[in-house]
Structures are given as C-alpha cells and as structure tokens.
Image (cartoon, rainbow, N blue to C red):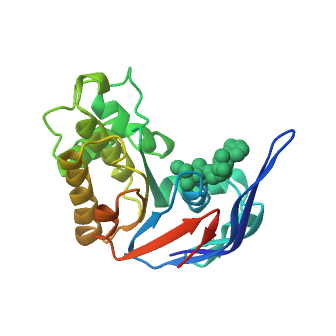
Amino acid sequence: MIKLKNIDKVYRTDKIETLALKEIDLEVKKNEFLSIMGPSGCGKSTLLNIMGLLDQPSKGEIYIDAEQVMTFKDKKLAKLRNKKIGFIFQSFHLINDLSVVDNVEIPLLYRKMSGSERRRRALAALEKVGLNTRTKHFPNQLSGGQRQRVAIARAIVGEPEIILADEPTGNLDSNMGQEIIDILHNLHKNENTTIVMVTHDEHIAKQTERIIRLFDGAMVN
Ligand SMILES: Nc1ncnc2c1ncn2[C@@H]1O[C@H](COP(=O)(O)OP(=O)(O)O)[C@@H](O)[C@H]1O
Ligand SMILES: [Mg+2]
C-alpha cells in the first residue's frame, strides 16, 4: 500500500544541517496496523509527514499503490492525498470558530459534492466516533477526548484507505487515550483501513500488529 525506498531527509537552516531520516526502507501492507516508536526528535513526525505526502524527502522513492508519487505535480499529489489519506494529530488541529460538523466537512470541500451530501457524510462520520449529539458544538466546548474524536471523524469522512496518526493520544489521559485507540482498532477491523500511528506509549503500541523503532533518524529493528 505504502512503500518507502532509501529515504533520507535533511533539514537545512542557515547554520545547521539536520539529517532527520537516514536510509529508511519501509513497506506498509494493505490493512496493516503499524506503530512507530522512538525518543523525541528521532524523526517520527518527519517520517509520517513524508508517508502522508505532506513533506518531501531529500532522497529516495515513495510508492502509494505501486505508483511512484514523487514524480507527481503538486495538484495531482494534493488530490491523491485528499482521496487516500486521513491525518490525525496530537493537538487535534481543529478550527475553533467552526462547529463540529463544519470541521468534519472540511476534506469534502475539495471534492465535487453537494452541501447536503457533505452534511450527510459528516454526520455519518460523527456517528461512527460516537459524537452525534455534539454536532453543533464548537471545539472549545468539548473535552480533549471529544476533540480528538472530531478529528478522527474529519480524517475518515472522505473514506480514506490510509490513516496516519501522529501521537493521537499524546494530549489525553489513559482512559480517553484508550477510547481513541479502540476507535482506530474498529476502523482497522470493520473498514479495512491501513493505519500507521506514532506513539510514545508501549502499552498502546503493543496492541498494534507491528512496531517500527526509530533512533536518530534510522530504523533499528
Ligand atoms: N522544519 C524543520 N526544520 C529543521 N529541523 C527540523 C524541522 N522539523 C524537524 N526538524 C528536526 O528533525 C529531527 C526530527 O524531528 P521530528 O520528526 O519532529 O521528531 P519526532 O517526531 O520523533 O519528535 C529533529 O532533530 C528536529 O529538530
Ligand atoms: Mg513528533
């Protein structure tokens, strides 16, 4: 489903050069649930952003469904990303002056679709994460766990085949965190979604099918 071949990522600023990823080779199979672990600064977010086509590697190749996507122009890349990939972030990244349901509709604004169809799909996504009674609320009226569930609804509203989650439970207590992980497990099981999740939590990582460990930008297992 996703294949990374010999990926390097170098960040350059005026004075310093950081080699954030070194020779990463990784294949994620369709319907796999994988976690990425490693100390702070080891390149986890960089790796996830490259997989999600949000950032470009300095070297190497990226394949999505056997297509070499590095050759794609920006517009084609954005379209592919919108269709195939849903993102979930540690700090939710919701828009505070939009209601819950309007936040969830955002990915659909980039598709040709009527307003009523957008609304119908957003409400269905909110139902899947158990938030159908909070659709008119605003993000700051919700708990952290509820905000993350809105972010998951937004990630799944376009029915992506892949979900990339960067420390989705990092801002939540362990009970709320487990609720979020349970939702991801259901998506994996019921909708055959391929999931790659960054986490600091061994207990959470152990619930996934495979753990990748990074250290100083390199894969260590
Ligand atoms: N935009 C950036 N510019 C320069 N250096 C960066 C940038 N983003 C990340 N880095 C550096 O790359 C390394 C990996 O960062 P990151 O992928 O965020 O790590 P993690 O998510 O594992 O904490 C770190 O040393 C970080 O300081
Ligand atoms: Mg990170």
Of residues 35 and 51, which is closer to you in this image? 35
Question: Along the horizontal axis of the image, is 178 left or right of 140?
Answer: left
Q: Give the image location of residue 127, x and y in percent.
A: 18, 47
Determine the residue positioned at 60% across, 57% down: 43
Residue situated furthest left in the rendering:
133
Say if 161 sits above or below 16 in the image: below
Determine the residue positioned at 22% across, 69% down: 190
Q: Give the image location of residue 134, x and y in percent.
A: 18, 31
Determine the residue positioned at 73% across, 65% down: 8
Q: Can see residue 203? A: yes
How many marks the image carries: the answer is: 0
Question: Along the horizontal axis of the image, is 55 left or right of 168?
Answer: right
Image quadrant in which you'd find residue 10: bottom right
Say if 147 sits above or below 10 in the image: above
Residue situated furthest top in the rendering:
97
Question: Along the horizontal axis of the image, is 172 left or right of 29?
Answer: left
Q: Can see residue 54? A: no
Q: Give the image location of residue 115, x and y in percent.
A: 35, 35
Of residues 7 and 101, which is closer to you in this image? 7
Q: Give the image location of residue 171, x and y in percent.
A: 35, 40
Of residues 11 and 64, which is closer to you in this image? 11
Say if 221 sits above or below 102 in the image: below
Determine the residue positioned at 82% across, 45% down: 16
